[in-house]
Amino acid sequence: MLKCIVRGSKGEEFVKLPLETLVEVFGVVNGDQLRIYTYRVLVKPVVERSIDYMEADEWDPITYAKYSVWGIRNPRYKYTVILQFHILRYMREYLYKNGFVELLPPMISVSSDPGLRGAKKLKTIYYGVEYDLTSSVIMYKQLSVSVFPKIFYVARNIREEPLENLDTGRHLSEFTQLDMEQAFASMDDVIAIAERMLRHVSKKIADRYHDLIVEKIGLRKEPVVFKPPFPRITYDEALDLVAKLGYPVKWGCELSFEAEKALADYFETPIWITYYPVISRGFYYLSREDDPRYNLDFNLILPEGYGEVIDGGSREYRYEQLVERIKRLDEPLEKYSWFLELVKQGAIGPSSGWGLGIERLTGYLAGHKHVAYASMYPKLPGITMTP
């Protein structure tokens, strides 16, 4: 953004034009001075702009969500969008080079992911029939990877998050995930892919766009560069540690946001938590053979309170076990009949994969303290009538 002192015979009338007038200027720029010879108005507002978006970096998340159509013109948020572009660009670069095929995600489904941890699925009516808006592409990943051995989606998801999630700094009701899946891969295989990809992305951005992070966004003194392998602890080990840190969690429950923050801050690095209890997650995870109380699954927790950025694991593909898991969750089998019929007829095979929250990762790399600032048009839990 160029700031100039306007000079020339046309300067006085030029500066009286309403804010946001689009003009074509003919003149000379010399340092911080613009000498105007003539100009032509291309678009002139009907009324003067009432929002000062140059102050948007002082807005709270709700105000930003309300006025994001203006806030995005603020340099900090404009360059955050550019950062997000580079994050997705280098993720795609890494996955393409490693043989992954990008697929297009569905927007509606007869049944979407049930494992939403307190959030609700949103509905729509499609030719008189109730459908779910996509809350996750997990079942589509399992189907797709049986045809294409390595796949990923950049998928928009929507969920009605609990109202208390408004203040976590981590939750949007509409968000983006990079969802990858690989046939016949183990949990360790896909964890390694995530670590190498995060290293690739953060190193490229730090090397090529240092000024974007440090000067243009201006919230971090230095770019973050991930240094895997990250520490791994089991869910049970995490419970023991957070209890010692003053954040006890009952076995079988999700870790609180405060407990996750304390855990990641204790290690001062992203940390993998593995083997969550079966009762705490959706039906699509394989359980451990040596202890079926636990899933073959994992979360990656970021430090500084940014929380979970990756969720994944090895997928259940056996018909009888899937039916048992769905019943255990008190979900009606007919709701997932389209998926179960595919499983019964052999269309679903072994795979592992994960989903990575794009806005959460963007917010962490940029240094934003709320995920709303990493979304162009944020939808916050409980906040309606935002663009």
Image (tube, rainbow, N blue to C red):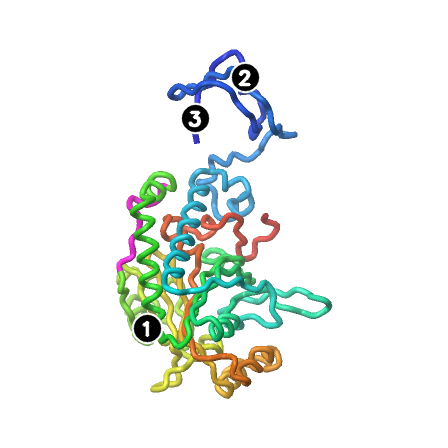
Name which residue lies at 54% across and 65% down: 135
- Magenta region's main secondary structure? loop
Residue situated in front as seen by the camera: 56 or 241: 56
Q: Which residue is mark 2?
A: 38
**Residue 58 on image: x %, y %:** 44, 40
Q: Return the residue at label 3.
A: 3
Question: Residue 84: which disc?
Answer: none
Q: Is 2 drawn above or below residue 290 in the view shown? A: above
Q: Is residue 69 magenta?
A: no
Q: At numbered mark 1, what does the secondary structure look like: helix, strand or loop? A: helix
In the image, the segment drawn in magenta is 218-227
> Residue 318: x, y in percent?
48, 85
**Label located before the other in sequence (2 or 3):** 3
Q: Where, by quadrant of the figure, is residue 28 drawn?
A: top left
Q: Is residue 99 above or below residue 10?
A: below
> Mark 2 to mark 3: distance in Å?
18 Å
